[in-house]
Image (cartoon, grey):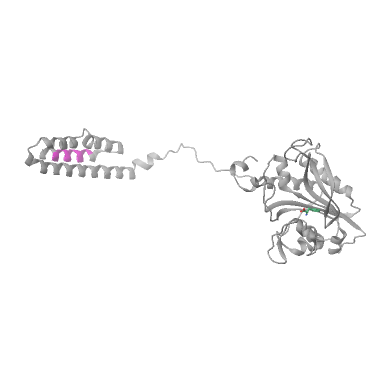
Amino acid sequence: MKDTLEKIRHDALKDLDTAKDPQAVNALRTRYLGRKGAVTQCLRQISTLPPEQRPEAGKLANTVKKALETAFTEALKRLEETAGGPLEALDVTLPGRPFGRGHIHPITQTAQEACDIFLRLGFEIVEGPNVELDYYNFEALNIPKDHPARDMQDTFYISKDVVLRTHTSPMQVRVMEKQPPPVRIIAPGPVYRVDSDVSHTPMFHQIEGLMVEEGISFGDLKGILTTFVHQMFDEETALRFRPSFFPFTEPSAEVDIQCVICRGKGCRVCSRTGWLEVLGSGMVHPAVFEMVHYDTDRYTGFAFGVGIERIAMLKYGIDDIRKFFENDIRFLNQF
Ligand code: PHE
């Protein structure tokens, strides 16, 4: 038994020297240590030996088994580390992982589309601060500190005199302060209000429009906004101007468009009215002109503020404004 075991050990190690790849090593392992392997068979035969020989034989058999186990494992490791393993595992014909390709956010797309329409109508794009002075956001727009109209907008205050702008209208004042008429600008960008539900988010986007020249009338306002709506949606979409109030315009109007979902018949989206409110507008209030030292006898103008999310929701039939800001890639990929 002792000689047999020594011979097995010797043969196994010699065979291992000639093994060139992991498969060969594994075959040897089965041949010597497998269920029907040479070492296993020796171990089984120990019980047939005379009792006094058993301990020594058992000890030797186990030593050989362990030694071979270690030798095979080390040989495998060596072969995998060098030529065999990783190199063979590198499949150069495998197609690469594709990079996910991004695209412009639906709100930005809608804003760009709207801006393009106004650019074609001769408007110029301007941008201004999101963190705004109380003066531009309210006071210069004919909304003094104690004015009840301040309740219309729930404001994020940074300090007593600094706010996150609640609308893009401060840009009217910033532009007129810097240049004499004629003025024809649009001011797109984010605005902020303390508000959050299916149709409100604390941050949303507006496009402000302002046109000031000699002889500008409410008819010009209607003409520009009608062109905008027809180009943004289609020629069939009807508009209606509803009398309203803003401290910085007089007269003021809210503009509804015919519901693009039900075509005016009445549905869930338009609360069965057939109409959807999309923007606020009006003729610039003389008090605002006075703040920027424009001659109120000579110049008139109109202004409007469009909600971009509103337009995007109608264009794409989205019923929850919050979807735009959750950044769920499955939602965004559809645009
Ligand atoms: N700034 C107003 C709002 O946010 C909209 C508006 C803009 C109204 C310009 C009239 C003129 O509700």
Q: Position of residue 181 (x, y in %)?
A: 86, 58
Residue 177 quadrant: bottom right
Membership of 65 in magenta stretch = no
Left or right side of 17 for 98: right
Q: Position of residue 249 (x, y in %)?
A: 84, 55
Residue 187 quadrant: bottom right
Q: Which residues are drawn in magenta? A: 5-15
Residue 141 quadrant: bottom right
One can see residue 104 in this view: no
Magenta part mainly helix, strand or loop? helix
- Residue at 67%, 49% (x, y): give it: 197
Front-lying residue, 239 or 271? 271
One can see residue 255 in this view: yes
- Residue at 38%, 42% (x, y): give it: 86
Q: Position of residue 172 (x, y in %)?
A: 80, 58
Q: Is residue 167 above or below residue 240?
A: below
